Amino acid sequence: KMVSLDPPLFEDIVCSKNLKCGSEMLSSRVASYCRCRPTNMSASYLRRLTENTKRMPRIAHDEAIFLIRLMVDLEMIPHMFERENTADAAAGNNRLRGDTTLYNRCVVASTETVLRSVKEPKPSDVDDDEDRMPHSSAQSQKNAAQAADYNSLPPTVKIHLLEEALKTTDSPPIQKKLQPEVQSFTHDDDDILIKEGNPKLMRRAFEQELAAYRNKLASKEEEIRRYASELKKFARVPNEYQLPQMVADFTFKSEPELDRYGESIYGTIPPTAMPRTGRSVKNGWLYRENQWNNENGDTKLWPMFYYKAN
């Protein structure tokens, strides 16, 4: 089997001028090899296998989402979605940059899978088997795996794939009940079903879902911005730092513990400030920083943290 070949030999076969293989079949073989050899994958290797658009102009539709997810894992995609300015960010415009040839071919091939992944209800959302589309168990498992790959993609990539898929379809073939996050944008008294042959209703529902995804994405971006701002405030304790002689001078505990003489073992003065994002505990060791302004001294008590590797 080809998956048993070493990566250099597999590359020689795929890139050989004498290879006789259809484009979609070749892309399926490449995807199967990548799926079975995750530890051998790299961005440069995947690019060499797929960069020849004459040999592989089309991607198999049932492997397109997997290849996109692989590109995400290999960090080949994030730089494509950089936004040029705040106006683009506000408008939700994602401008692709960089080497996008494989990604663009996968986008074209993924239309059917993306629409099915978005429109098909999850098993937990279906009460009876009679509400499900009739298809074989093997096909059902395959569709579920593709939907899982799609749902695992970053929100920005999912939105872009869905937008591109909507541009190519006029009559979505599968019906779907609106998800709760979409229903929040509609009338509460109406139980709206998106039915076959009603592309306007389907498009409106997808636009509402896109709006929900964009709201979630904006919320996550703001959370990341806050964390990044807080991380800039961390500094290493210098070598020349002198620890105070008394434990109470460089610790804090909100509920004092007294020794046998009635004195607090730990300090009772809280930190001057704490990180504003994330969970932090006030109790703990403090870094005393003595600041001088002319002849007046001022002591700041900063919370001390330590770095713990995984």
Image (cartoon, rainbow, N blue to C red):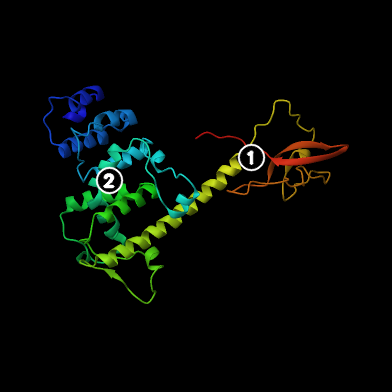
* Circle 2 residues within 10 Å: few <14, some 14–19, many ≥20: many
User: Which residue appears at 15% of the width and 25% of the height?
Assistant: 17
User: Which residue appears at 75% of the width and 37% of the height?
Assistant: 288
**Residue named by callout 1:** 233
The residue closer to the viewer here, 71 or 97, is: 97
Q: Amino acid at mark 1?
A: Lys
255 relative to 188, above or below: above
Question: In terms of secondary structure, where does tag 1 sit?
Answer: loop
Question: Quadrant location of residue 18?
Answer: top left
User: Which residue appears at 78% of the width and 33% of the height?
Assistant: 244
**CA gap, disc 1 to disc 2?**
41 Å
* Circle 1 residues within 10 Å: few <14, some 14–19, many ≥20: few
**Which is closer to the viewer, label 1 or label 2?**
2
227 relative to 29, above or below: below
**Residue named by callout 2:** 107
Q: Amino acid at mark 2?
A: Val
Residue 292 location (% of width, % of height): 82, 36
Question: Quadrant location of residue 184?
Answer: bottom left
| Image mark count | 2
Image quarter of the N terminus: top left
300 relative to 3, above or below: below
Question: In terms of secondary structure, where does tag 2 sit?
Answer: helix
Question: Quadrant location of residue 10?
Answer: top left
Q: Which mark is residue 180?
A: none
- Relative side of 310 to 251, left or right: left
Residue 42 location (% of width, % of height): 33, 30
- Relative side of 242 to 196, left or right: right
The residue closer to the viewer here, 97 or 186, is: 97
Residue 309 location (% of width, % of height): 52, 33
